[in-house]
């Protein structure tokens, strides 16, 4: 019997089969979870629907997380289909391409607001909407990146958004802990996905990462999926408000030069 047999949850943020959210969905489905999928808008339905249907999803709904009415409708529908849910995955981020090149100091007001709205406020809004569907407790998971803590080339406004996202995880965990709802983040190493390809120089960054990370490799969707399973399951039932690194150890380094080059 799978770890998630009899458990139901929603996944926000599958864009295509390379999405981190899809890696998490596959890991959950393999353990028997019943999954519902929400995607950003009509343009994505063509890609997301066949993936969701391959896991027999009963819930496949559009939701632009910048629109309160979309969130309200998406969760009303989830309540209709499932009644209650056990977990929620938030794997959503966005910044304008021009903000992910050049200097952070040149970030526009509009670009700053948009990145914070889609990548940070959406977690707050989705968590609030999920709360009534989790009367017996639950687990909420978001995705972050080390650019929240250290300056990463071209990550710019998204680094600032991820710092705010991680702080939001802690505040949400404190608010919802008394109801048995846990909120955590996985800080993933770089993976080539649609959003990641918007960051200038990403391919070279991936190469560098695999040369210096303690495990001497990049991380995969499957790596993230396995840790997500743990955080979303009862195995992590006393873990909340945390940022867990799944990054082949990269974040522990003080000097990101391979040891071989120093000897
Ligand atoms: P992805 O496949 O492109 O997924 C990002 C998702 O966010 C897409 O489904 C995208 O839909 C959705 N989104 C953007 N704006 C939205 C909106 N207004 N409403 C609803 N959904 C919206 O990329 P990913 O790399 O898997 O990203 C998932 C999460 O992992 C993000 O939070 C990202 O920052 C984080 N992360 C990624 C990496 C990495 O290296 N890939 C590392 C650490 C953390 P559209 O395509 O329609 O915009």
Image (cartoon, rainbow, N blue to C red):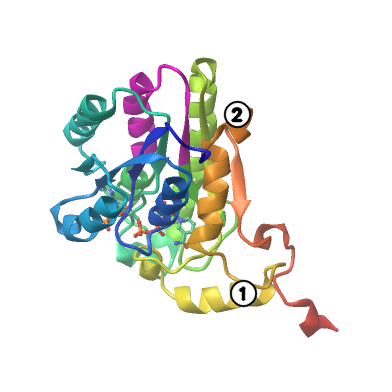
Tell me which residue sits at (53%, 44%) in the image: 229
Residue 148 visible in rendering? no
Judging depth in this view, the residue of 10 and 112 nearest the camera is: 10
Splitting the image into 4 quarters, where does residue 253 fall? bottom right
Identify the residue under disc 1: 210
Q: Residue at x 62, y 51 (%)?
A: 245
Is residue 250 something that shows in the picture? Answer: yes
Looking at the image, residue 249 lies above or below residue 240:
below
Residue 222 placement, left or right of 73: right
Q: Pointer 1: residues within 10 angstroms few (<14), some, or many (20+)? A: some
Identify the element where label 1 is drawn.
helix
Is 49 situated left or right of 33 in this image?
left
Residue 230's x, y, as percent? Answer: 58, 42
Q: Quadrant of ligand 1?
A: bottom left
Q: How dense is the environment of label 2, judged by Cα within 10 Å: few (below 14), some, or many (20 and up)?
A: some
Residue in front for this viewpoint, 82 or 20 = 82
Q: Secondary structure at mark 2?
A: loop
Q: Residue at horizontal 70%, vertical 68%? A: 215
- Give the quarter of the image for residue 197: bottom left
35 over 45 or under it: above or below: above
User: What residue lies at 26% left-to-right and 41% top-to-bottom?
Assistant: 65
Q: Circle 2 sits on which residue? A: 237
Q: Nearer the viewer, residue 146 or 141?
A: 141
**Highlighted range, magenta:** 121-141
> x, y (%) of residue 201?
45, 76
Residue 135 is covered by the magenta coloring: yes
Q: Earlier in the sequence, mark 2 or mark 1?
A: 1
Q: Is residue 173 left or right of residue 15?
A: right
Residue 218: in magenta span: no
Disc number lying in front (2 or 1): 2
Image-quadrant location for residue 111: bottom left
Q: Position of residue 80 (x, y in %)?
A: 21, 25
């Amino acid at each position: 019997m799978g770890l998630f047999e009899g458990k139901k949850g929603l996944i926000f943020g599958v864009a295509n089969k390379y999405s981190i959210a899809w890696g998490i969905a596959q890991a959950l489905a393999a353990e028997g979870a019943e999954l519902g999928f929400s995607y950003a808008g009509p343009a994505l339905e063509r890609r997301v629907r066949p993936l969701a249907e391959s896991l027999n999803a009963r819930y496949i709904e559009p939701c632009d997380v910048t629109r309160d009415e979309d969130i309200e409708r998406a969760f009303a529908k989830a309540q209709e289909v499932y009644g209650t849910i056990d977990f929620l995955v938030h794997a959503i981020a966005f910044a304008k391409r021009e903000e992910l090149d050049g200097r952070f100091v040149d970030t526009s007001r509009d670009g700053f607001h948009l990145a914070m709205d889609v990548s940070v406020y959406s977690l707050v809004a989705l968590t609030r909407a999920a709360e009534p569907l989790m009367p017996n407790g639950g687990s909420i998971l978001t995705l972050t990146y080390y650019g929240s803590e250290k300056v990463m080339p071209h990550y710019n406004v998204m680094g600032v958004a991820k710092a705010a996202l991680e702080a939001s995880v802690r505040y949400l965990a404190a608010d919802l802990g008394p109801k048995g709802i846990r909120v955590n983040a996985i800080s993933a190493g770089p993976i080539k996905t649609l959003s990641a390809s918007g960051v200038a120089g990403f391919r070279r960054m991936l190469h560098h990462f695999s040369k210096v990370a303690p495990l001497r490799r990049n991380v995969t969707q499957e790596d993230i999926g396995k840790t997500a399973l743990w955080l979303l399951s009862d195995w992590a039932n006393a873990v909340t408000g945390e940022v867990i690194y799944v990054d082949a150890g990269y974040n522990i380094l003080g000097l990101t030069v391979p040891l071989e080059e120093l000897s």
